[in-house]
Amino acid sequence: MHYGGGDPFYVPSNSTNMADAANKYSDNVSGKFYVDDQCIDCDLCRETAPANYKRNDDGGHSFLFKQPETPEEEALCQEAMDGCPVEAIGNDG
C-alpha cells in the first residue's frame, strides 16, 4: 500500500484525528484555541502564528501561549489550525 510517498506528515484523507479538548496540553492558556497530544512538533503553527504559539522544549510539542486578541491573530491561528498536518489544533469557540 502507498502511504503518502514517505511524507512523515501524511494523514490519510479518511482520518478522524481531530483535536480533542480532553487531550490538550496543560501549558495551553485557557480559551478557544488549544494544541492536543497529537502534536508532532512540525513547527507549522509557530511559523504561521508566532505571536500565539510556542514550543515546549522539554515535551517536544507546540502549545498556545496567548489566545488571539486581534482579527489578524484570529485569522493566523485559524490558518495554523487548518494547516496542521495531524489536526492537533482545536477551536472550541
Image (cartoon, grey):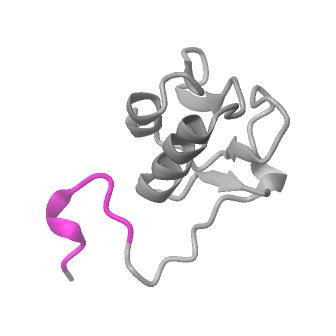
Q: Which residues are magenta?
A: 2-11
Farthest-out residue, front: 71
Query: Is 64 above or below relative to 6?
Result: above
Q: Nearer the viewer, residue 40 or 67?
A: 67
| Quarter where residue 35 is shown | top right
Q: From the viewer's perspective, is 64 left or right of 44? A: right
Q: From the viewer's perspective, is 54 left or right of 20? A: left
Who's the residue at 48% across and 32% down the image? 49
Quadrant where the C terminus sits is: bottom right
Q: Where residue 40 sits in the image (x, y, percent)?
A: 47, 42
| Quarter where residue 33 is shown | top right
Who's the residue at 83% across and 40% down the image? 31
Who's the residue at 54% across and 15% down the image? 57
Q: Where residue 8 sits in the image (x, y, percent)?
A: 28, 52
Q: Where residue 82 sits in the image (x, y, percent)?
A: 47, 58
**Residue 7 among magenta residues:** yes
Q: Where residue 47 sits in the image (x, y, percent)?
A: 38, 29
Query: Is 45 above or below relative to 18?
Result: above
Q: Nearer the viewer, residue 87 or 6?
A: 87
Who's the residue at 79% across and 29% down the image? 29
Q: From the viewer's perspective, is 3 left or right of 28? A: left
Farthest-out residue, left: 5
**Residue 86 among magenta residues:** no
